[in-house]
Image: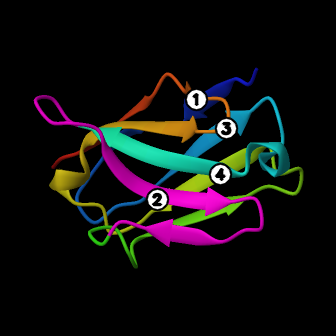
Amino acid sequence: QVQLVESGGGLVQPGGSLTLSCAASQSIDSLSFIHWYRRTPGKQREWVASIRSDGTTSYEDSVKGRFALSSDNTKTTMYLQMNSLKPEDTAVYYCYTPTFDTWGQGTQVTVSS
C-alpha cells in the first residue's frame, strides 16, 4: 500500500512557473515509476511526464523543454517544475504509481491572466 499526495497547484499568469510536489509514503525505489497526468473538464486524463527510480525522465511532447521532473534526496517526494506555462496547461494534475495502481488526489493548476 502507498499513499501519494500532490501539492503546489494554484493560479499563475501565462509565462509563469509553478512547482508541483508528489509526496509518497514509500521511496520511488520501491515504486519503480511515478507518472504525472492531467485532466481538464470534458477531456480524458492525459499523460504528462514520468520519472523512473534510476532518475530517467520522459515527457509528453507539448511540455518537453518546459517541464522538468526531479526528486528529493530521500526519493519520497517528486517534483514537477513547470515553466513557461500556457493557458492550455490548465488542468488538475495527478501523480500515479502503477506498481500499486494508486493515484493522488490531484492539485489544480490554472493558467490565466
Discs 4/2, front? 4
The front one of 66 and 29 is 29
Query: Which residue is at a point 74% across and 25% down the rendered structure image?
Result: 2
Question: Separation of disc 1 and disc 2 at Cα?
Answer: 17 Å
Mark before the other along the chain sequence, 4 or 2? 4
> Is 47 colored magenta in this rendering?
yes
Identify residue type, mark 1.
Asp
Amino acid marked by disc 3: Thr
First along the sequence among labels 1 and 2 = 2
Q: Which residues are magenta?
A: 40-60
Q: Confirm or deny contact between disc 4 and disc 3 (CB under 8 A).
A: yes
Give the quadrant of residue 61: bottom left
Q: Earlier in the sequence, mark 1 or mark 4?
A: 4
Q: Amino acid at mark 4?
A: Phe
Q: Nearer the viewer, mark 2 or mark 3?
A: 3
Q: Disc 4 to disc 2, how far (Cα)?
A: 10 Å
Tell me which residue sits at (56%, 33%) in the image. 6
Residue at the extreme bottom of the image, as rendered: 65
Task: Judge left or right: residue 41 versus residue 1.
Answer: left
The residue labelled by disc 2 is: 49
List the residue tagged with mark 3: 99
